[in-house]
Image: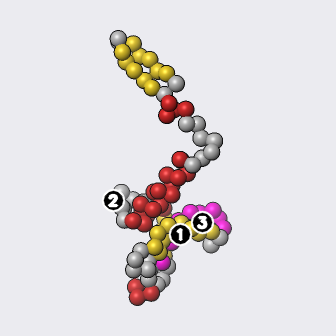
């Protein structure tokens, strides 16, 4: 494994990491606390983010993904200033 970034650490000591291996595969690592056995497991991203998965560790990954959209310095943000109206039966879009 070449890279990993901590996503979330619970109050009981469990930790979740976003990881990438040498073949560029990306997955989540869950490291349970010592009393739970402490044996790490790898979770495929799709399985980790499946519908209904809404724990704080899932929310942390969604927030991280969201920063990739918001923080890109070259992102085209002109769409935010656009407006569309349908007044007097005519469609009008302005930028």
| Above/below status of 15 relative to 24 | below
| Above/below status of 87 relative to 71 | above
Percent of width and height locating residue 51: 36, 57
Q: Quadrant of residue 2?
A: bottom right
Q: Secondary structure at mark 1?
A: strand
- Image marks 3 and 2: residues in contact by CB distance under 8 Å: no
Residue 22 magenta: yes
Q: In the image, which disc is placed on residue 6?
A: 1
Label 1 to label 3: alpha-carbon separation: 12 Å
Percent of width and height locating residue 22: 66, 67
Residue 88 magenta: no
Residue at x 40% of width, y 88% of height: 35
Q: Would residue 28 be seen by someone viewing this image from the given angle? A: no
| Above/below status of 68 relative to 89 | below
Q: Secondary structure at mark 3?
A: strand
Nearer-N-terminus badge (3/2): 3
How crowded is the residue under tag 1: few (<14 C-alpha within 10 Å), some, or many (20+)? some
Residue at x 44% of width, y 77% of height: 14
Label 2 to label 1: alpha-carbon separation: 22 Å
Segment colored magenta: 21-31
Assign the N terminus to one quadrant of the image.
bottom right
Q: In the image, which disc is placed on residue 20?
A: 3
Q: Would residue 71 be seen by someone viewing this image from the given angle? A: yes
- Image marks 1 and 3: residues in contact by CB distance under 8 Å: no
| Above/below status of 42 relative to 50 | below
Q: Which residue is mark 2?
A: 52
Q: Image check: 39 left or right of 86?
A: right
Nearer-N-terminus badge (1/3): 1
The front one of 65 and 23 is 65
| Eye-nearest disc, 2 or 1 | 1
Nearer-N-terminus badge (2/1): 1
């Amino acid at each position: 494994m070449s890279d990993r970034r901590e996503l979330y650490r619970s109050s009981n000591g469990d930790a979740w990491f976003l990881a990438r291996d040498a073949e560029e595969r990306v997955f989540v690592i869950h490291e349970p606390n010592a009393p739970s056995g402490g044996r790490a497991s790898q979770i495929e991203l799709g399985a980790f983010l499946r519908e209904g998965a809404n724990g704080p560790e899932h929310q942390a990954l969604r927030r991280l993904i969201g920063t990739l959209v918001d923080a890109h310095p070259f992102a085209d943000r002109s769409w935010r200033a656009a407006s569309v109206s349908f007044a007097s039966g005519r469609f009008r879009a302005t930028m």
